[in-house]
Amino acid sequence: MERSDTVAAVNAAALQEEALAAVAAARSADELDGLRVRYLGRKSALKLALREVRDRETGIALNAAREAIEQAVAARQTELERAELEARLSGERVDVTLPAELLGPPRLRRRGSLHPSTLVRRDVEDIFLGLGYEIVDGREVETTRYNFDALGFPDWHPARSPRDSLFLGDDVLLRTETSPAQIHTMESRRPPIYMVSIGRVYRRDTIDATHFPIFHQFEGLAVDTGITMADLKGTLLHVMRQLYGPDREVRLRTHYFPFTEPSMEPDVSCFACGGEGCAICKHSGWIEMGGSGMVDPYLYEFVGWGPEEYTGFAFGMGIERTAQLRYGIAGIRAFWENDLRFLRQFR
């Protein structure tokens, strides 16, 4: 059977040798693609010969040449891609030890800053650690037993109402203050106890300039033998001077809190006007800070201690309230709006 001129003109071995040499010498992906079209394309001599083959031996030889060329093209393509990747990685490598200002234009060099609440929280932690207190993390989801019952809240107290507190179930709610952490600590061991609990608390408040459903508190507890009201005032005076300056004074006004007896509200002398009267202190010379008092003996009975064995004091203040006074921030909403223009002011 006669073969066509095209088949007869193709020497499979010679074509394979020529193609493999050309593929091995290719230096770029574009050059390799051109060789693929030349030797394996639809109009290549090899493909035309395969279409016209009429005998088994010729077909075997041509197909073997085609497979060898395809494998060589694929292998060379992998080599070129790997070489290109290595070259790119070598050229684009970043020295992580370089100063940040050398790595980009000025708009990319802007440093982040801590949230004002975080700044105050860290200062509070440092102050109490310096006094020998321990920092205790409490549970944000609490039971009414620890959030209300253990703290002496009567059944009629408005804080127990779903209108004031965020309940997750009949006896489970988001804590309204960090005081439950103090009860857990008192149940876990005997005095001496000197601790401060810091964290988020939740109340069903309408958002305005001074109220938000989420805010932060720090609450301290000291229980030991022989603790008096003078220890409470001395501790608050030290804390206020550390937070607002060395010239601050503290006064205590009588008040009511369910878990302290007697209860007092501490005021700190105005750091803006020095007590002469200004808009920050409402022209009184004093700024209200939170609540405090001597621990009610009821709490000792709740945790199984004798009410005459120990004495102690407790106090609590708002982190955002403290930050507002320190930095002159008008409203509490700015703390939760995540506005970078506001946050960048603090370092």
Image (spheres, helix red, strand yellow):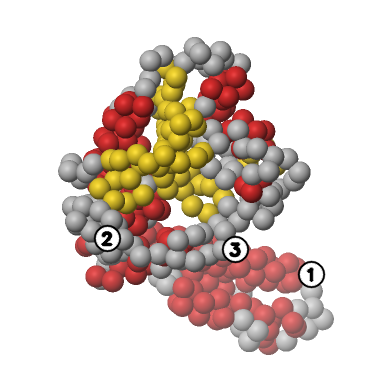
Q: Which mark is residue 321?
A: none
Please name the amino acid that badge 1 sits on: Arg
User: Of discs 2 and 3, which sits in the foreground?
Assistant: 2
Residue 329 visible in the picture: yes
Please name the amino acid that badge 3 sits on: Gln
Q: Are marks 3 and 1 in contact (CB under 8 Å)?
A: no
The residue carrying mark 3 is 71
Q: Nearer the viewer, residue 295 or 200?
A: 295
Query: In which quarter of the view is residue 217 placed?
Result: top left
Q: Position of residue 164 (x, y in %)?
A: 63, 53
* 221 over 112 or under it: above or below: above
Q: For marks 3 and 1, give the CA distance.
A: 23 Å
The residue carrying mark 2 is 283
Q: Quarter holding the N terminus?
A: bottom right
Q: For marks 1 and 2, give the CA distance.
A: 109 Å
Q: Quarter holding the C terminus?
A: bottom left
Q: Which mark is residue 56?
A: 1
Residue that extends furthest to the right in the rendered view of this protein? 1
Q: Residues within 10 Å of mark 1 (few under 14, many from 20)?
A: few
Q: Residues within 10 Å of mark 2 (few under 14, many from 20)?
A: some
* 198 over 1 or under it: above or below: above
